[in-house]
Amino acid sequence: AVRRACVLTDSVFHKLVKNETLTKDDKSPVTVGDFSAQALINTIITRAFPDDPIVGEEDASDLRVESGITLRNRIVELANEALTAELKQGDDPAWGIGPGATQTAEQIMDVIDRGNYGGGPKGRMWTLDPIDGTKGFLRGEQYAVCLSLIVDSRVELGVIGCPNLPIDPSNPSLGKGSIFYAVRGQGAWQVPLTEPFSSSPKRLTIPAFTNETLNLLESVEKAHAKLSFNDRVAELLGITRPPTRMDSQAKYCSLARGDGGVYLRMPTGVGYKEKIWDHAPGSVLVEEAGGVITDSRGEPLNFGLGRTLGENFGVVAAGKAVHSRVLEAVQKAKEEEALAAQNAKI
Ligand SMILES: Nc1ncnc2c1ncn2[C@@H]1O[C@H](COP(=O)(O)O)[C@@H](O)[C@H]1OP(=O)(O)O
Ligand SMILES: [Mg+2]
Ligand SMILES: [Mg+2]
Ligand SMILES: [Mg+2]
């Protein structure tokens, strides 16, 4: 499902025109690529696991009204193109894909809305972010197709497709596009996007870092994370390498294979709540690569609270040894901030 969605989003990027993007109520963009990829993946999950609910980012309400007709028609066309594309290794026609698997507009809208599940502490559920990092996607930079399976609040499986991420940053000639995945207890792995089943998966482990090699992975978008706080944490840790900025859960993939040493995401203070689909796949990937992920207090992320992670204390992910040092630096930077705020009041 993730492979097929990556082919879809990559082809949408090259065909995208100006009026194919909407601005949602929270001011974030959503494109025909997000909707059609959610239709595609929800179709496959629904056919393979009919009883499983899905917590998906997008919903079809904006497409069901008069003003959404043009966008809806385009999404139906793109979703059907992706659904009916020829079967590849690993595909099963019972999943509603392959030549002839066309759906009506109504079916496409309904299957997008299979992502409306509210989440919660008990039972099996999938999380889906059809395009994570939509702003990166629109810039032609990093984005990711992100899927996870949660059972009783614990992430058991995470799959992240990164069409624009170099396969090996130290060897650019290998090109771009990988799928990263982890099954709880079975390790973290990387396979090429083009041939995910016929090449042997590469096992990922977070390497050891020194102060010279350590660096931060952080958002491109200033509105998504408090980057000035990251700078202070880096300073406290004695980090000299500049941060690596990239959109989406590609940051978790980069962390899992050692391209960067710490993923630090602190709230900007405007009340934004982090969504479970933005961290569930990445969290199991990092843990299976030998890392630790918590909020900035050192508490585990709680995937059983509903569609969000609840009150926002940020995210800290890193290899085991580095993680405890980062938490200490984060506490120190928070204390400094509190003191400065107090002084400003006086
Ligand atoms: N105001 C916000 N604060 C934090 N994250 C946000 C905000 N608005 C959208 N996001 C989500 O942050 C994630 C990307 O952030 P980054 O790339 O900086 O890590 C995406 O999941 C994006 O949603 P989306 O999936 O719609 O792109
Ligand atoms: Mg979005
Ligand atoms: Mg997202
Ligand atoms: Mg998204």
Image (cartoon, rainbow, N blue to C red):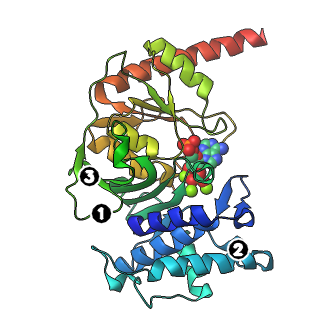
Secondary element at tag 1: loop
Which is in the foreground here, disc 3 or disc 2? 2
Q: Which mark is residue 184?
A: 3
Residue located beneath label 1 in the image: 195
Instruction: Identify the residue at horizontal 73%, vertical 62% (top origin).
Output: 18
Q: Looking at the picture, how far across and down is residue 207, in whole percent?
A: 27, 30
Q: CA distance from mark 3 to mark 2?
A: 39 Å
Instruction: Identify the residue at horizontal 56%, vertical 50% (top origin).
Output: 133
Of 57 and 168, nearer the camera is 168
Q: Looking at the picture, how far across and down is residue 322, in whole percent?
A: 34, 24
Crowding near pointer 2: few (<14 within 10 Å), some, many (20+)?
Answer: many
Quadrant in the picture for residue 156:
bottom left
* Residue found at the very far front of the displayed protein: 173
Crowding near pointer 1: few (<14 within 10 Å), some, many (20+)?
Answer: some
Mark 3 within 8 Å of ligand 3, using the beta carbon: no
Of 139 and 227, nearer the camera is 139
Image: 15 above or below 309: below
Q: Looking at the picture, how far across and down is residue 215, in whole percent?
A: 43, 24
Secondary element at tag 2: helix
Q: CA distance from mark 1 to mark 3?
A: 23 Å
